[in-house]
Image (cartoon, rainbow, N blue to C red):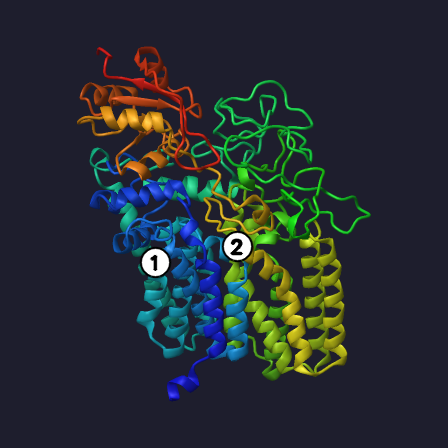
Amino acid sequence: MRKLKKLDYWLVLILVLAAFLYGYNIWKAGDANQYYTAAIVSMSKSWKAFWYGSFDPASFITVDKPPIALWFMVLCVKIFGFHSWSIVLSSVLFGIGSVYLIYKMVKPYFGRLAANLAALFMTLTPTVVANSRTNNMDATLVFFLLLAGFTLQKAVAKKKSWLVLVAFALIGVSFNIKMLQAFMVLPAMYLFYWAATKAKWTKKLGVTIFSTIALAVFTLAWPLAVDSTSKSSRPYIGSSSTNSVLNLAFGYNGTQRLLGQTTGVGGRFPGMGNKSGKSNNKQFGKPSGKPSGKATGKLSGKPTGKPTGKSMGKPSGKPTGKTSGKKFGKQMGKKPSGKQFCKQMGKKPSGKQFGMKRPSGKQAGMQRPGGKQGGMGANNIFNVGTKGVTRLFQTALGRQISWLLPLSLFGFLLAYYNEWKKKRELFNQRQSHLLYWIAWLLPIAAFFSIAGFFHPYYTIMLAPAIAVLAAIGISSYLENRSDKANKGIFSLGLATTFWLQAYFVYDYYQWLTYLLLAAGFIAIFATWYLTKKNWQKFAVTGLLAAPAFWSLTPTISAESAAVPTADPSLLTSGGNTGFDSQSVDESVYKYVTKHQGSAEYLFATMDSNSAAAYIIKSDKAVMTIGGYNGTDNAITLKQFKQLVKEGKVKYFLLSGRTENSSIITWVKKYGKKVSLSQSQTSQAGPMDNSGTLYDLTQIKQ
């Protein structure tokens, strides 16, 4: 009975809500992110592939991330079998786990109300919902970062130095989930330990040094183990430029995320992170700020002609071309004039259902050729707004993460002020915890404000801090609501938050804009003139109305995409299967499986996206000589010729999204085109995976 009395039923309801939002309809996930799904299939077939995170069962090349998150996904597949839901199950569980950890991190220091609100705010953050429904690494990463923070809290509270080492070791583990992105919370970890620990500075320095050593050991253990292995005995490290995990970590997954892609490795989409707007790459796959051709809207390998005002250079509100398969990307909405309510460019829904208005005009996030800011790729994958301090408040990123961002900032000020005025202390227990969360929020917010190469869903990194600080701010106000300074700070938080939310919804629901503005006015009036808590509940309900609806959209539409997003346009477009989801060409598949014989690979191709669907369907190895985007130097022409000579590779699929490499030239010159029946695709996806199949068995060397 005592346990039942201690049970927080509000928390139970919040966790049930999280389970629904993150888990409902995942059985319709399809292949989710095909790139990682192919790796899950491959890793479940071979311990070697499992250890290295190989893309293919033969371990020719790895994916572009470390394998720890994928290990959990493979475990689910091993337990439950390969299903649409099993490949995303670990993300669902980690998403729910993150909600629970936030509750456990807040309750002991700020009370049950703040803990429940923080858990609820985390649950209803749109990008958290979208990320927790796919097989990307981000939901797993956030869970482990929260687990590290929770462990550090316990270490400080119980005065256990060894637990501090464990906390920093968990950050090292997190590095092997998504590399340097894990280190974003290190400022918060170090600051909190020094502010919250009541010990001599010499002891704190010693613990800090040993904790940093633990961090380094767990960070480098897997990368050094892989890099020290003979390159002939392990797969090529995908998306690296030197076949090295450390190069991948500090290059493609490191400096290029901040500065933008400059090497071209892994750069499939134009207009992202290219400062000069110039590119020496003639392939469609690599970034280019200045298109060399006339945009037709079709998925062609090489644009031709000059950009016009209706193409990438100066986008218009209407699509100018067609895409193969399902609708390839969401068309963006209009930028109203200065006299109108919103100045931010928004998305263009595909229909008028659900009361949405149809924005028109210029697309958001796209720059003129040669501009400094990267443009919008397929499915808005690079629509991250304009660099600067306002980027997180623009619709491109804001609709995914920033619904409560102003309230979290004012919430920190409010709560810290209330603690300071009690004893005029800077670092009491609550203040130390507040510093932890603000030190989580601000550096990561700064990164996303200036970074040159990332996807909108990466902003899930901000979700825990925003949720916690907003919740603590509300709780702190209620504890001190008779204080005029409290009322003033809280009113500013409410005003800016309601206004921002009204701004976010304007392109879809103008009526909701005015409703939110009215709700904000009522909430502020209640803050000053009404003392009953019911009015405060009204304010919280009003604050959550719009983000809750946005959070429902991936669940209702059964979205589980390579680039997860939450957006009302999902309700009218039938969900999003991912920007790189491709289909199996049945005629190619039947031919290569019939004639594979003893060959190690079903066929070879240039990029992983052309191969993923075949690996998933067949459980067999497909060689991707250029890695994810066809730009890696994973194999030389001489080595490839030797594999052909030995009969390990019999066929090459030239899909039309490949670059002009020496291997392609050789295949075209000496290979024999295979005459196939009319192509038929078997798995729905926005890109057709048909191409030209070359028979290499007749080549004389």
* Residue appearing at x 52%, y 74% in the figure: 116
Can you see residue 427? no
Give 558 or 443, whichever is nearer the viewer.
558
- In the visual, does 512 lie left or right of 641? right
* Residue appearing at x 49%, y 53% in the figure: 130
Can you see residue 313? yes
Residue under pointer 1 = 215
Q: Pick whichever of labels 2 and 1 is earlier in the sequence.
A: 1
Q: Quadrant of residue 43?
A: top left
Q: Quadrant of residue 133?
A: bottom left
Q: Residues within 10 Å of mark 2 (few under 14, many from 20)?
A: some
Measured from the top left, where is residue 270 in percent x and y?
A: 54, 31
Q: Is label 1 in a helix, a strand or a loop?
A: helix
Give 460 or 372, whichever is nearer the viewer.
460
- In the visual, does 214 lie left or right of 525? left
Residue under pointer 2 = 556
Position of residue 522 relative to residue 370, above or below, is below
Q: Quadrant of residue 57?
A: top left
Q: Residue furthest right?
A: 339
> In which quadrant is the C terminus drawn?
top left
Numbered circles on residues, count: 2
Q: Tag on residue 37?
A: none
Q: CA distance from mark 2 to mark 1?
A: 41 Å
Q: Residues within 10 Å of mark 1 (few under 14, many from 20)?
A: many
* Residue appearing at x 34%, y 58% in the figure: 215
What is the three-letter code of the residue carrying label 1?
Leu
Position of residue 132 relative to residue 250, above or below, is below
- In the visual, does 171 lie left or right of 600? right
Q: Residue furthest bottom?
A: 1
What is the three-letter code of the residue carrying label 2?
Ile
- In the visual, does 46 lie left or right of 493? left
Measured from the top left, where is residue 434 in percent x and y?
A: 53, 70
